[in-house]
Image (cartoon, rainbow, N blue to C red):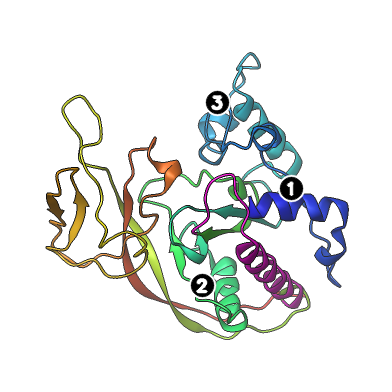
Amino acid sequence: MSGVFLAKHWLRDPSELQRDTFHATPFLGNPRAIEKCVRYIERDLNRTFTAKFLNSKDSNIESYEVQRTWEVNQIFGPKSSSQAYDFMFDLHNSTSNMGTCLIVDSEHSLLPMHLCNYIQKHYTRSPCPIYLYQLPEEEACGINSVAKAGLALELGPQPQGVVRADLLVQMRSVMACALDFIDLFNKGMLFPPFEIDAHKAVEHIDYPRYPDGEISAVIHPNLQDKDFLPLKPGDPIFQTVNGEDILYQGDDTTYPAFINEAAYYEKKVAFVKTEKLTFSFPALQKKL
């Protein structure tokens, strides 16, 4: 809802999206879902920007989100083409304690990683962990994958269908910082090489389940709200209604993200295992 409120504000008054070298275009990804205050109508829009749906020629597909995918791709893409927009931001909230999280598809995205480094250095009101979401062999499927490069903001915790003023202000400030970076990049500023920590997704962990598929245990109190903090082998991760603890059986320390995310119950994801890695990036400068 933070992104929805900001986009609606910018559609009325886009002046703060203006920079010397560009003007950002605000838009609402899923207007019909926004009207109903739900994540989506028929299928998750942010899992639909894949070749399977973008290349479909079936005009009789009734799914609203698939049709919306085609519209967004036509306006801001086409995906993987030279005509696509240079950069797209995807503004999200999470019910998980993700903080002011910066989401990039992978560590191979040089411009977004330089942007993350710039944000971490210039936005100091809260930590800004970096989450690399793309699993091996997985296609980038989010809405910002339509553009040549992109970044998603994931701020939380915030309940679904609710706007928190503090997170709204944080998202607006991070966006201002990000737009400043792109303006400086367009003007030819040299951004030096750097090292940075990021959390790379490794595996999606489901809840324990009964044979009929129903969830048999919930996130353990010791794990709740501990996104991006170390989880060691033997630490409790789930708890049954009867109070039985279920321990983490992994061999190595992991750094879970999206812990107990409300939207991921249907996706059978209790949390995402990540590994905390340090990456090195070369200098970046636009050729003018």
Q: Which residue is mark 1?
A: 83
Which one is earlier in the sequence, the residue at label 2 or at label 1? 1
In the image, taking residue 189 as reference, residue 142 lies left or right, namely: left
Residue 273: name its quadrant: bottom left
Q: Position of residue 4 (x, y in %)?
A: 69, 49
| Viewer-nearest residue: 93 or 288 | 93
**The C terminus lies in which quarter of the figure?**
bottom right
Determine whether the residue tagged by mark 1 lies in a helix, strand or loop: loop
| Disc number for residue 128 | 2
Mark 3 or 1, which is nearer the eye?
Answer: 3
Q: Nearer the viewer, residue 80 or 254?
A: 254
Q: CA distance from mark 2 to mark 1?
A: 31 Å
Q: Amino acid at mark 3?
A: Glu
Answer whether residue 34 is magenta in the image. no
Question: Would you identify the image quadrant in which residue 262 lies?
Answer: top left
Q: How many marks?
A: 3
Q: Which residue is denoted by mark 3 in the rendering?
A: 42
In the rendered image, residue 59, in percent from the top left (x then y), is placed at: 66, 17
Within the image, what quadrant is residue 37 found in? top right
Q: Nearer the viewer, residue 228 or 242?
A: 242
Q: Amino acid at mark 2?
A: Cys
Nearer-N-terminus badge (2/3): 3
Stretch of the chain drawn in magenta:
157-184
Nearer the observer: mark 2 or 1; the answer is: 2
CB within 8 Å, label 2 to label 3? no
Mark 3 crowd level (few <14, some 14–19, many ≥20, 10 Å Cα): few
Is residue 56 among the parts visible in the rendering? yes
Instruction: Specify whether residue 183 is painted magenta.
Output: yes
Q: From the viewer's perspective, is residue 55 above or below residue 16?
A: above
